[in-house]
Amino acid sequence: MSDVPDIVVEALKSAEARGFALSCEEMVGRLLATLASAVPSGGRVLELGTGAGVGAAWLVSGLGQRSDVTVLTLERDPELAAAAREFAWPDWLEVRVADAEKELPRLGRFDLVFADAEGGKWSGLDLTVSALQPSGILVVDDMDLSRYQSAEHRASVTRVRDAILSDPRLVAADLPVGSGIMVAARRRD
């Protein structure tokens, strides 16, 4: 882990200590850091599903010392959000306890969205796409059908993948790596 940013290592240790096994995997994290580094000045980043803070840590590592971008991460579980707040986040990152589907219509638009929670990905995906700025980037993970045994979960993944690939507002790539990653850009209006 020598090339993994310190803040990510700290978040991974916290997740492990709490028995939280659903953290953002390294491949997705590196992609998030790369995309975050390109967010324009004054930009906004949204993470749906803070979990133990690993995804947020990758986003922060990509932004480095920039203070011209804000990051909002939503977590429905108050205990997980409280644990994530324990980190020494930059003051431009906010961890908020919220249901993504209820909150999304009030949040405005974002340059980068990482949808890693039930709300905003498995349900309410249209709200997430609507929250993208023109030219905004959407990252959705856990799209590899082989990860799921139940027919219900497989149907949900297929529905999300099809929705992203067929949405006329998006140009999307289905990347069959890791947990299965989809990356989409919102077309300019």
Image (cartoon, rainbow, N blue to C red):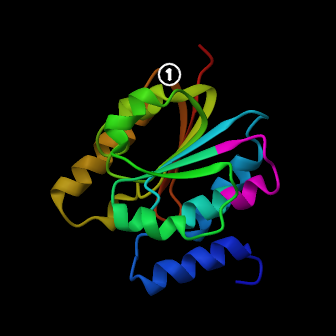
**Where, quadrant-wise, is the C terminus in this rendering?**
top right
Callout 1: 10 Å neighbours few (<14), some, many (20+)? some
Q: Which residue corresponds to the image point at 56% horizontal and 78% vertical from the top-left?
A: 12
Residues in magenta?
60-70
Q: Which residue corresponds to the image point at 82% horizontal and 55% vertical from the top-left?
A: 65
* Residue 106 point in image, percent of width and height: 43, 28
Kindly identify which residue carries mark 1.
169
81 displayed left or right of 67: left
User: What is the quadrant of residue 173 in the picture?
Assistant: top right
Residue 9 visible somewhere in the drawing:
yes
69 displayed left or right of 111: right
Residue 59 sits inside the magenta stretch: no
134 displayed left or right of 108: right
Mark 1 residue type: Arg
Image position of 106 with respect to 98: above or below: above
Q: Which residue corresponds to the image point at 50% horizontal and 66% vertical from the top-left?
A: 84
Give 189 or 158, whichever is nearer the viewer: 189
Q: Mark 1 falls on what kind of element?
A: loop
